[in-house]
Amino acid sequence: MTATATRTGILIGAVLSLTWIAFGFWPCLFVAVAMAVGALIGRLIDGKLNVATLVDAFRGKRSSS
């Protein structure tokens, strides 16, 4: 069985919903932020994230002219 975007989304949804049920909103938000940071670090390590493009996006610069 291979990991697809759908299965990954289901797993993320399950983790977040169980965290919300068990601990409440703020811990759930913390887990969601930690998962997003982990995903960004993973993409950076894999070489699938261009940091310069990401910084430009946060500065409001457009990637296409």
Image (spheres, rainbow, N blue to C red):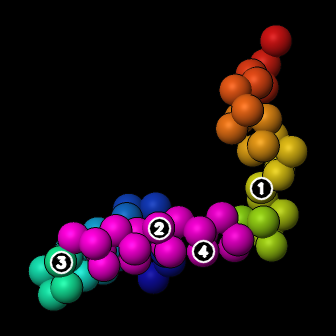
Q: Nearer the viewer, residue 3 or 26?
A: 26
- Residue located beneath label 2 in the image: 33
Tell me the CA gap for discs 2 and 3: 15 Å
- Does residue 53 sit above or below 32 in this rendering? above
- Residue located beneath label 1 in the image: 49
**Comparing marks 1 and 3, which lies closer to the viewer?**
3
Provide residue 16's location: percent of width, then percent of height: 29, 74
Query: Dividing the image into 4 quarters, which one contains the C terminus?
Result: top right
Is there CB contact under 8 Å for labels 2 and 3? no
The amino acid type, in three-letter code, at marker 1 is Leu
The amino acid type, in three-letter code, at marker 2 is Val
Provide residue 51's location: percent of width, then percent of height: 82, 52
Q: Residues within 10 Å of mark 3 (few under 14, many from 20)?
A: few
- Does residue 55 sit above or below 11 in this rendering? above
Q: Residues within 10 Å of mark 2 (few under 14, many from 20)?
A: few
The amino acid type, in three-letter code, at marker 4 is Gly
Tell me the CA gap for discs 1 and 2: 18 Å
Q: Which residues are magenta?
A: 25-42
Whether residue 27 is in magenta: the answer is yes
Tell me the CA gap for discs 4 and 2: 9 Å
Which numbered disc, 4 or 2, marks the residue that appears first in the sequence?
Answer: 2
Tell me the CA gap for discs 1 and 4: 13 Å
Q: Quadrant of residue 54?
A: top right
Residue at image position (19%, 85%) is 23
The chief SS type of the magenta part is: helix
Which numbered disc, 2 or 3, marks the residue that appears first in the sequence?
Answer: 3
Q: Quadrant of residue 40?
A: bottom right
Q: Residues within 10 Å of mark 4 (few under 14, many from 20)?
A: few
**Residue 58's disc number:** none
**Comparing marks 1 and 4, which lies closer to the viewer?**
4
**Residue 24's disc number:** 3
- Residue located beneath label 4 in the image: 38
